[in-house]
Amino acid sequence: MFFIVLTMTVLVIASIHDIRKKEISFWMLSACGSIAVLTSAVGIMDGVKTWEECFLAIVPGVLLLLIAYVSRQGIGYGDGFLVLAVGPVFGFEQIFTGVCLAFGISAVFSIGMIVFAKAGRKSSFPFIPFLTSAMGVILLAAK
């Protein structure tokens, strides 16, 4: 639970930074990556996680990186690397569900912005705030 709270704290900070500067800093990626490695190591040593579960948890991040490459950064590489870094903390099911929910929330937000003429079709929005809110919803729903 400690690692999840720590990761959510970093995600909130990354969200604020992403909104303000439209980028994710290296220290945030490093912090999330370090937490993920520590979580995985502790989980494997305690027998709570397996190597396969830890590997599977990075798949959504790898998929986002592929989408970033194919779409010429329609979604940024930083978003993919952050999902890659936080995957092992949350596990495959939660991070995959979180990414899907974040896409859904961002779609509703984007449609609303277009309908109210606050943005156009080519406008871009930071993804990490949507991911953070989606992970918060998932964590609250899991309780």
Image (spheres, rainbow, N blue to C red):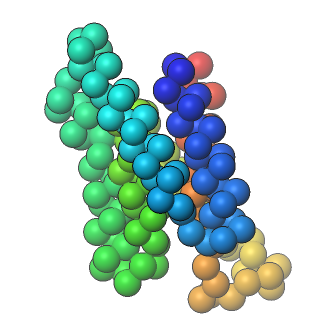
Looking at the image, which residue is at 24% across and 40% down?
Answer: 56
Looking at the image, which residue is at 46% across and 79% down?
Answer: 74
Looking at the image, which residue is at 56% across and 69% down?
Answer: 23
* Residue 107 showing in the rendered view: no
> Which residue is at the front of the view, 15 or 100?
15
Q: Is residue 110 left or right of residue 99?
A: right
Q: Is residue 78 left or right of residue 105?
A: left
Q: Position of residue 124 (x, y in %)?
A: 61, 79
> Which residue is at the front of the view, 100 or 51?
51
> Which residue is at the front of the view, 37 or 104?
37
Location of residue 88 by image quarter: top left
The number of numbered badges drawn on the structure is 0
> Which residue is at the front of the view, 63 or 32?
32
Location of residue 5 by image quarter: top right
Q: Position of residue 26 (x, y in %)?
A: 47, 59
* Residue 119 showing in the rendered view: yes
In the image, residue 91 sits, relative to residue 26, either above or below, namely above
In the image, residue 107 sits, relative to residue 32, either above or below, namely below
Residue positioned most to the top? 46
Residue positioned most to the left? 52
Q: Is residue 99 left or right of residue 110?
A: left
Looking at the image, which residue is at 39% across and 58% down?
Answer: 81
Q: Position of residue 49 (x, y in %)?
A: 26, 21
